[in-house]
Image (spheres, helix red, strand yellow):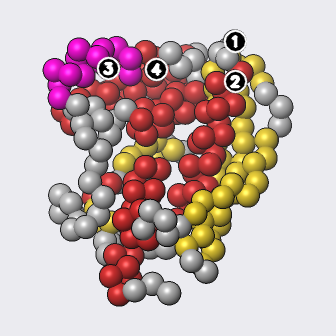
Amino acid sequence: MFNDEQKAALSAPLSRDAVKKRKGGGMDLSYIEGWWAIAEANRIFGFDGWTRETVDMLKCGEPEQVNGKWRVRFMCKVRITVGDIIREGTGYGSGIAGDLGDAYEGAIKEAETDAMKRAFMTFGNPFGLALYDKTQSAVSDTSQVVGQSPAPARKSAAQAKRDGDNETVRGILEGADTLEELDSRWRQVENEWLPILPLSWEDSVRDVYEKHRDKLKEKETA
């Protein structure tokens, strides 16, 4: 059902600019962000050419309290429909916050985004399929693959400084009391903050994350 232009876009390499990294199981894991998958779907299929449906949302156990904060977990199944083609993906989300409602919101959003990306992945490289190949041979090192979605507009360093973004992001990360909570907050920072912060700030933000992670590791092993 796809036209030649769409087939070419789906088989095109994934831009290296879209690939993000996070820690997981002691390794660096590669992934794409949720906004990228949606932007690529709009570009390739059209704004009215696809739909997303949350098929199932399962709470994994009851809320728990960890160091005075609530932790909740969800599994989610999302269905992506493009014309007559239906693809599904299952994802997991964990939320930790002082307010129970905030913990639920974080876990549900993370589970839905994870499931959506897994469903989209089956359509091709622009949706992250290229990352399942350990060699990443279908990831392009060019600054931007022609036609793929541009990154959202970044703030200037002056604007970000005026808005107090450095203090806000530092507070998000350093407010974590456990490694699990820190990783959840890091995913929030990667999805919501890194795409709009000045590019020159990325290393310093990652440094805050790594230093606080080391601190929490020492605390948990003490």
Three-letter code, disc 3? Asp
Three-letter code, disc 1? Gly
Give the residue at mark 2. Answer: 101
Per the rendered image, the range of residues in magenta is 156-169
Tell me which residue sits at (32%, 20%) in the image: 165
Three-letter code, disc 2? Gly
Q: Is residue 111 above or below residue 198?
A: below
Secondary-structure class at tag 4: helix
Give the residue at mark 4. Answer: 172
Give the residue at mark 3. Answer: 165
Tell me which residue sits at (18%, 63%) in the image: 142
Give the camera-side residue of 16 and 113: 113
Closer to the chain start, of discs 4 and 3, is 3
- Check the picture and name the quadrant holding the C terminus: top right
Closer to the chain start, of discs 1 and 4, is 1
Three-letter code, disc 4? Ile
